[in-house]
Amino acid sequence: MPDEQKSIEDRVADLETLAMNAFHHGNAREGLWLQREAALKAEMRAMYQALIATVGELAMHAGIGRDDFERHFQARIKFFYRQHLEEIEDEDPGLAASLDTRPLMEYDLPEGIPPLFGPPPSAP
């Protein structure tokens, strides 16, 4: 019986070691994933800001004022956000509802994108 007891204790110790190694390995992988995610977010933000600055500059060069550009830009954000929520809603209505919790009465959704060189949409 003492040999069997030692054998069980050894097995438990081996399992504990294995579990701890798996835990540490998982944490290391999660750390790498978080670093990659942070780097991707930083790159996406930089690309977004560069694009907005460039397009804004081009619009001003074409004679579109800063306020008009801002209204056009915000209308496009609403349009594409709605479009993406509708795609999500087709797959998972609960997820779409959890992402945008506004009551229907608060929706100010453009039907389409107004042309940049036309009159700007009304202010939000």
Image (cartoon, rainbow, N blue to C red):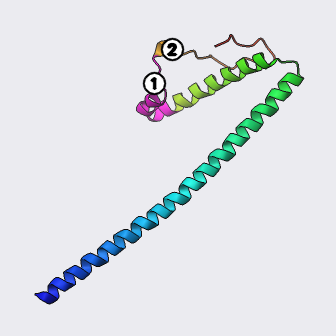
Task: Work out whether 41 lies above or below 71.
Answer: below
| Residue in view at x 44 percent, y 27 percent | 97
Q: Label 2 sits on what residue type?
A: Glu
The majority secondary structure of the magenta stretch comes to: helix
| Residue in view at x 45 percent, y 67 percent | 25
| First of labels 2, 1 by sequence position | 1
Task: Work out whether 79 lies above or below 87.
Answer: above
User: Label 2, on which residue?
Assistant: 106
User: Label 1, on which residue?
Assistant: 101
| Residue in view at x 79 percent, y 19 percent | 66
Residue that lies at the very extreme toward the bottom in this rendered image: 3
- Specify the segment rendered in magenta: 88-103
Q: Hey, which quadrant is residue 95 in on the image?
A: top left
Q: Is residue 71 left or right of residue 1?
A: right
Q: Quadrant of the C terminus?
A: top right
Q: Hey, which quadrant is residue 36 in on the image?
A: bottom right
| The one of 16 and 81 positioned closer to us in this rendering | 16
Residue 114: horizontal and vertical position, in percent? 72, 17
